[in-house]
Amino acid sequence: TFAIVIMYGLWLGIDLDYNNAETLLQAAIGFHIVENLFCIAFTVEIFIRFGAFRTTRDAVTDFNFALDSGLWALMALETWVGYMLGAFQVHFVDGGGIGFIFRGLRLTRVCRLARLFRIVPEVDVLFRGLKAASRSVGATMALLCLLIYSFAVVFKILTKGTGIGDLYFGSILDGMSFLLLPGMLPDSAQIVSEVGQEGIGYASVLMIFIVIATIIVMNLLVGMMCQSVSVVASVEQEELVVSYVKSELQSIMSKLDKDGNGVL
């Protein structure tokens, strides 16, 4: 299962790069074969796991199985049900109705990669750490938003009627955007602005990615620092113990060696 999920994750990138069709029905034959093979593999897995439960209630109440079953159902809907819908309503696909729905279904493929987080224990530990710190991070984010808003109001008042005010603080939202991007995230300001020109939703998703990635990198650096300090502390403690034992043994040996010849 682990290998299949990894291969599916790699295939997801290949499919997005080389498959420009709106739905699987319009794709090349190679994409049909691979998608059906993966769908069959995940179907077999779901039925095997379901058969391993003692009762149906145990299967329904198991969170991991319920989540994987939901992802499998969406995958089957996109792959197999899509054949039937596309065969009878091809003109709707070309018009964008069903095509829009299937684009939404393709987004759910990313959720299947979350299984890797449950399989690899180290990644699960990192996410548990992020979950434990989510409350403090949320409070910090709220304080940061309040700070940005407050200073946007201050600059709006102070720069009213000036060139800087017209350029950067024409409105409260413009001021907050300026303080957040060029002020706090200058390296990401240009790309976020360019993406935001296509739609505020795209810019919002990009900002969510930047925030999450930054928190993960910070967690990585803090974890590495804590690990390094822990290793150095344990080594230092072991050296102190060895030094203490050595000094005590030398003291005892010197007391027992009456003639000082180094032989007991």
Image: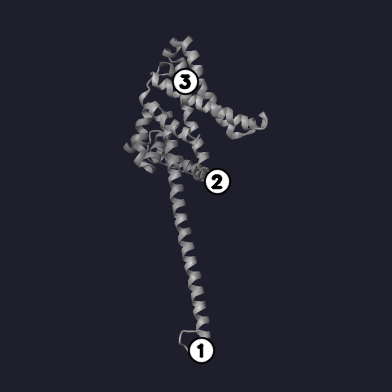
Question: Mark 1 and mark 3: span between their CA atoms?
Answer: 92 Å
Q: Which residue is mark 2?
A: 132
Residue located 45% across and 61% down the image: 232
Extreme residue in the left direction: 163
Residue type highlighted by circle 3: Phe
2 or 1: tag closer to the N-terminus: 2
Q: Is residue 263 visible?
A: yes
* The image quarter in which residue 168 lies: top left
- The numbered disc on residue 7 is none
Residue located 53% across and 81% down the image: 252
Q: Secondary structure at mark 2?
A: helix
Residue type highlighted by circle 2: Ala
1 or 3: tag closer to the N-terminus: 3
- The numbered disc on residue 258 is 1
The mark lying in front, picked from 2 and 3, is 3
Where is residue 185 shown, x and y percent of the image?
38, 42
Where is residue 20 shown, x and y percent of the image?
37, 21
Q: Which residue is mark 3?
A: 102
The mark lying in front, picked from 1 and 3, is 1
Where is residue 92 shown, x and y percent of the image?
45, 11
Residue located 43% across and 43% down the image: 214
Question: Mark 2 and mark 3: span between their CA atoms?
Answer: 36 Å
- Along the line of sight, the residue nearer the viewer: 195 or 94: 94
Q: Secondary structure at mark 3?
A: helix
Relative to 263, residue 8 above or below: above
2 or 3: tag closer to the N-terminus: 3
Q: Secondary structure at mark 1?
A: loop
Q: Residues within 10 Å of mark 1 (few under 14, many from 20)?
A: few
- Along the line of sight, the residue nearer the viewer: 168 or 83: 83
Count of number-bearing discs = 3
